[in-house]
Amino acid sequence: MASFKYNDVYIKDYCTIVGPKEKEGNIKFPNSIKDYYYDEENLEEAEIKMQNYCLNNLLKKNKMAASDINLVIGGDLIDQSVITSYNLANKKIPFLGVYNACSTFNEALLILANFLEAKMIKNGICITSSHNLNAERQYRFPIEYGAVRKIYSTFTTTGGAACLLTNEKTPYKIESSTIGKVVDYGIKDASNMGAIMAPSAALTLYEHLTDLNRDVNYYDVIVTGDLGLLGSKIFQRLIKNDYNYNLPNYFDAASIIYKEDQNTNQGGSGPVVMPLILFTKLLTEKKYKKILLLATGSLHNPLMVNLKKSIPSITHAISIEVMKWHIWMLL
């Protein structure tokens, strides 16, 4: 059993930023950059700056100094999570770097939640980012190369996100989590990430519900991270055929970021997708009380792809309960 329940872990605040293409999509994001370089000389520094914006803005909004933060947990897609490491340089905040590809943010949330639940710390920040031009260059081809994108490929989402977790009660409670298991169905095409990750999403959902003795109707909404349009269909078929679940209350986060005419094929991808949709849609619309987040990650790198190895995946689950404001004020 790799599931945990929490009594005193809450989201106190959050901050997001997105790229120019995301700004023109379906979601009204509050903060964005005008171009991929963000007034920097190179793309890596632009991504570091996006993360830094989220971290600094989160501290400023809550009238906190860096020294007030007990722990930062985070990661990104670029070699050895270098973006997050450089962002935290000289901040003098204890830091744990994590990597589970596009499920990195959920991984950071569940680790930090366990620290807080055990009363080892009083607060902490989860942080992540992705940048289209950085990630496409590393995992597929540089955009300048002009490679034709496959119809079943996704489009790396540009953005950054950070959130502050605490033991202080707020309307947004981290209620439970499930650590995923690595799954490999033998797929070798790195462009087909939806198909690669769908089996791990199905397994984690099944194990989460089984561990906690729940059914799918317990949640008002179940959201996968970045399976994309095709991957989300595969996921629903696996859930039905392998576990006999129907999901009337489900959508894929990456599938709703962009408009159809933005030419992203199957939708977005990247570790920033899940927090972007969580903080700018799920928590702000106030439609959902019980939310299950299934952040999906494709665990490959260019070397293993060039060696023609199959690609494993993982999915981590986080359950969030949104309390009504008048009830929260009485706690």
Image (cartoon, rainbow, N blue to C red):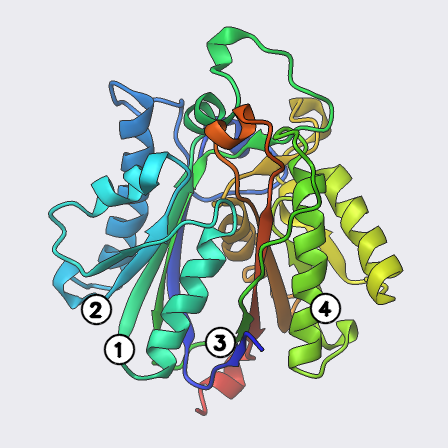
Q: Residue at x 29, y 38 (%)?
A: 82
Q: Give the crowd class for mark 1: few <14, some 14-19, many >=20 residues within 10 Å.
A: some
Q: Secondary structure at mark 4?
A: helix
Q: Which residue is mark 1?
A: 122
For the residues marked 3 and 4, what is the alpha-carbon distance in whole angstroms?
22 Å
Upstream in the sequence, badge 3 or badge 4? 3
For the residues marked 4 and 2, what is the alpha-carbon distance in whole angstroms?
34 Å
Which-is-in-front pick, marks 1 and 3? 1
Q: Which residue is mark 2?
A: 70
Left of 12 or right of it: where is 60?
Answer: left
Which-is-in-front pick, marks 4 and 2? 4
Residue 173, numbered label: 3
Q: Amino acid at mark 2?
A: Asn
For the residues marked 1 and 3, what is the alpha-carbon distance in whole angstroms?
15 Å
Q: Residue at x 60, y 36 (%)?
A: 268
Q: Amino acid at mark 4?
A: Tyr
Upstream in the sequence, badge 4 or badge 2? 2
For the residues marked 2 and 3, what is the alpha-carbon distance in whole angstroms?
19 Å
Tag 2 near tag 1, CB within 8 Å: yes
Q: Which residue is mark 4?
A: 206
As drawn, 242 above or below 130: below
As drawn, 255 above or below 176: above
Q: Secondary structure at mark 2?
A: loop
As drawn, 158 above or below 11: above
Tag 3 near tag 4, CB within 8 Å: no
Upstream in the sequence, badge 2 or badge 3? 2
Q: Secondary structure at mark 3?
A: strand
For the residues marked 4 and 1, what is the alpha-carbon distance in whole angstroms?
32 Å
Which-is-in-front pick, marks 2 and 3? 2
Taking the image as drawn, is residue 60 in sight? yes
Query: Where does the image place residue 3, in percent across and percent down from the top left?
Result: 56, 76
